[in-house]
Amino acid sequence: MRNNATSDNYRYSSRNVWSGILFGIGIAAFIDECIFHQLLHWHHFYDNSTTAVGLVSDGLFHAFSWFATIAGLFLFADLRRRNVLWAGKWWGGVLLGAGGFQLYDGTIQHKLLRIHQIRYYVDILPYDLTWNILAVIMTVLGILLILRAKQQSLKTRGTN
């Protein structure tokens, strides 16, 4: 019975990571949208047009964040139901998804495409550094958690 459980855990390894990634993307996008768009009014998802277009883009961005969150939670529930939830890989995926989203947002959307900035009419460098350094930290921690869970699994499989 133990070998079957370990085999199922290994088989569902990538689903654990993807569930976490989707949830992490959704949560990071949701926090970004709620705090920086709605509460602080620092920017819209798309700032290269009118305020009305910016608000519509925020709504679409908000919907995307919830679709990703819900998809991640459906996968999470399925993993729990099958008794193959691998917490280390899942939390690693959450950090990888949130950090990857934030790094994409800070580099591609802010700098390359210039569809919005974190803030306007201030020295943007401290904001950019904070945003992107936190993104890199989350991404690296996520990768490390996933690798650690994989190593622990290999040790467990080797002792069976």
Image: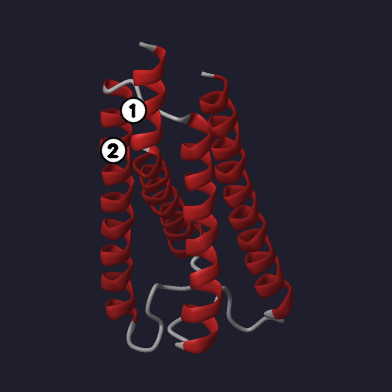
Q: Residues within 10 Å of mark 2 (few under 14, many from 20)?
A: some
Q: Which residue is mark 2?
A: 75
Residue 99 in the image: state x and y as whole percent.
Answer: 55, 58
Return the residue nearer the eye: 21 or 41: 21
* Quadrant of res 14: top left
Q: Is residue 107 left or right of residue 67?
A: right
Would you say 133 lies left or right of 35 here? right
Give the residue displayed 67% in from the left and 71% down from the top: 127
The amino acid pointed to by label 1 is Asp
Q: Is residue 104 above or below residue 34?
A: below
Name the element at disc 2: helix
Q: Position of residue 131 (x, y in %)?
A: 63, 66
Q: Which residue is mark 1?
A: 8
From this viewpoint, which residue is outermost toward the top? 1
Residue density around tag 1, few if under 14, some if 14–19, many if 20 or more, within 10 Å: some
Callout 2–callout 1 Cβ contact below 8 Å: no
Residue at 61% over, 53% down: 138
Q: Is residue 151 visible?
A: yes
Q: Is residue 84 above or below residue 120?
A: above
Disc 2 residue type (three-letter): Leu
- Side of 103 relative to 34 (left or right): right
First along the sequence among labels 2 and 1: 1
Q: What residue sits 57% from the left and 20% below the top?
A: 159
Classify 71 as above or below 132: above
Answer above or below: position of 104 versus 3: below
Front residue of 77/125: it is: 77
- Measured from the top left, where is residue 74 in percent x and y? 25, 37
**Residue 61 picture quarter:** bottom left
